[in-house]
Amino acid sequence: MHEVEGFQSKRRVLSASVALIGMCAAWAAQAQTADTALAPIVVQSKNADASAIGPVKGYVAKETTTGSKTDTPLNEIPQSVSVIGRQELDDRGVVNKVDEALRYTAGVTAAPYGTDPDTDWFYIRGFNATQTGVFLDGLSLFSYGFGGFQIDPFMLERVEVLKGPASVLYGGSNPGGIVNMVRKRPTDEPYYYTETGINSNGNGFGGFDFSDKVGSSDTMSYRLTGKIAGGDNYSDYSHDLRGFLMPQLTISPDEATKLTVWAYAGGLDQVHTSNGFFPYEGTVVDRPGVGKIRRDFFAGEPDLDTGRYNQEMVGYEFEHEFDGGWKIASNFRYGHLNKYEFGPYPYLWATQTELQRIGFEGDTSADNVAWDNRVENEFDLGGATHEIMAGIDYRYYRIDNVQSSVFGAGFPPQPYNGNLDVLNPNYGQPQPTLGSLYNEIITMNQLGFYTQDQVHFGDGWLLTLNGRYDFVHTDFDNRLTPANSFTSSEGAWSGRAGLAYEFSNGVTPYISAASFFNPLVGLGAQGPLLPEEGEQFEAGVKYEPTFMDATFTASVFHIKKRNNVVSIAVPPWQDQLGEVKSQGVELEGKVNLNDNWKVLGSFTYNDVEVTKNDPNPALVGKTPYIVPDVTASLWLDYTVTTGTLEGLSLGAGVRYKGESWADEANTLKVPDAALVDAAIRYTKNDWVASLNVTNVFDKVYVESCGGVGACGYGDARTFTFKLSKVW
């Protein structure tokens, strides 16, 4: 039962097996002249003078908005925050998906199912952030089932991770942390960039990124970013075509006022991969008579498999600063998604050499609205400096979720012979008539009120205080079983308190405590699912050396989550009778050592444990599957700045993931793995040619298993060549 529930839960979020795609990653740091080809030009938007949302110098970011909603130095945020900037994305060859950007980030398990090109997967501090922990420009991209938006990395200036609870700032969200994607914005100076490339699977891409003044105007600037990609993917029969276009316009009539309006349209058409749904036996361990299933094996139907989506967004950002120091800011975004999936999925073994397959069709329409309004000011009071903020935000999410499957007619094997032989694939079999699985409309409204005070006092002390109240209203219209429809309303408080001391040598120790809530959608045995809730305690040290450009963070944390959903043996198959704790240690460093060397490294020890499971007490003390106990990474990048080889750069990295469990009972392990990546680049006269290699030694390994029937291979060795130019 647990394997079925694990598979069903994964399938509702994941777009089945999916096509490996390509592309992205442009350079916003580029050569100034042929003689000084490696001196970076930092292209900044008007609101990026403090670099809180603008380009990152090398690998080292010093400010962010993700941990406070205001422009704040990283060492003043009482939680661990990681920032991956444009240059790091390019150096490491992030040309596929956003989750690939976080492979070298402490506390994050990225792409745990391996190649899954139409869904970005993130686990932070042991908890799945894929649905409730994804944000774009500080506004939620909440998702349910197949109703999740996907962002192309080429759109982005930064990818940032706030570790630990964030609901005090952003409303209901994943307790382990959030991923905040920061898009590129219009620039003050002319900027014209193009790129083209192809990978070793035969998947090519091309992109452009233009920004300039509007005509001779001194008050208006634009940015137009776009990309198209497509071709074959690693899995047999898998291919895709995708692209996007994002225009933006910034109007700034004076230094105190700025309005940016933007729009986005993107789409995907693909034949899926089968990765992520392979059985434990046959991937992690050999199956008698079979050995291991090939990584590139296609378990669907080549002539029938379909996966496509189109998504559109519009939004604005407005800010104005008054003479008295008060500042107002307003951000808004509306997004619409249509997504369609069709084709059989593999699931466990039917015979010694044949996989069972599950027919599936999904038709999803989703709407997402996010709106945030706040005021800020700074003043002295009682011998202390207060940076205060207060705001109101609102989010709306509606999904029309229709799914059909053989699950509706009974669990396979079906009366027809739909099995697939992995040694001699017998494609072209007739498909069954699918039965209704889900037919529902879900609407969620959330309204939040929040405050923050960052207090500097005593020549080095910093006290951060946050408070928030949220009201969540959910309508669940079950058109298959009207009796299971419901309406629920919940209110929740969140809080955070942090204390730090900034020494003159750059060392800042800190402690913090935060509470959280995370709204859930669905019906449990006791009625509508309540929000998850709990708290985190964190302590650490942040260090910004005075003698070099670098940041280091060391942190320890303890998170307790209540109202955890657990599986039960009768409909509705789930109940909120569980608790989970996550605790661990994280180390991370990023260094621009000099003009030649850049370094980044991370280490994570994460102990996740079930502390309560009333339906199945035997699981108490066990570790949930997927999340490894230890991860570590190191990346070195060297650039030749003088002599005959001036313009040549070499990069290399190693990633390690420790063991994880493949089942709830902790009887089946997924082994650890160490992977090597490499890069070589050459820069001349604003041209850049780069070659990145992922998994240099072509190690065959399994990233993780979400149950014994949901295992995913890690990426095979892939070469990606890119040629770009700043005009």
Image (cartoon, rainbow, N blue to C red):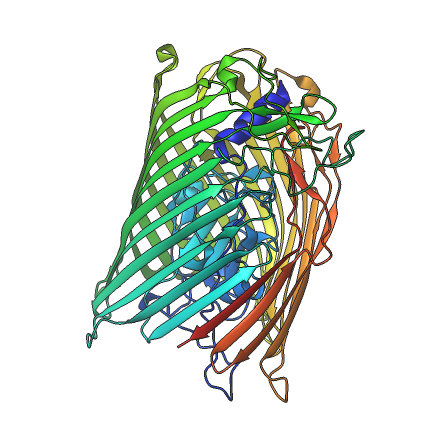
Quadrant location, the C terminus? bottom left
- Confirm whether residue 175 shows in the render: yes
Quick one: which residue is furthest to the right in this view?
Answer: 288
> Residue at 50% of width from left, 50% of height from top?
498
**Towards the viewer: 439 or 133:** 439
**Towards the viewer: 127 or 70:** 127
Please say if 693 is above or below 110. Answer: below
- Confirm whether residue 330 shows in the render: no
| Image spot of residue 116 (x, y percent) | 55, 43
> Residue at 54% of width from left, 31% of height from top?
10
Q: Is residue 325 left or right of residue 56?
A: left
| Image spot of residue 254 (x, y percent) | 20, 70
Quadrant location, the N terminus? top right
Please say if 565 is above or below 266. Answer: above
Q: Residue 268 appears in which quarter of the rendering?
A: top left
Q: Residue 146 appears in which quarter of the rendering?
A: top left
| Image spot of residue 606 (x, y percent) | 67, 43
Q: Is residue 528 left or right of residue 212?
A: right
| Image spot of residue 382 (x, y percent) | 37, 58
Q: Count of labels shown?
A: 0
Q: Is residue 436 left or right of residue 646?
A: left
**Towards the viewer: 687 or 258:** 687
> Residue at 57% of width from left, 76% of height from top?
682
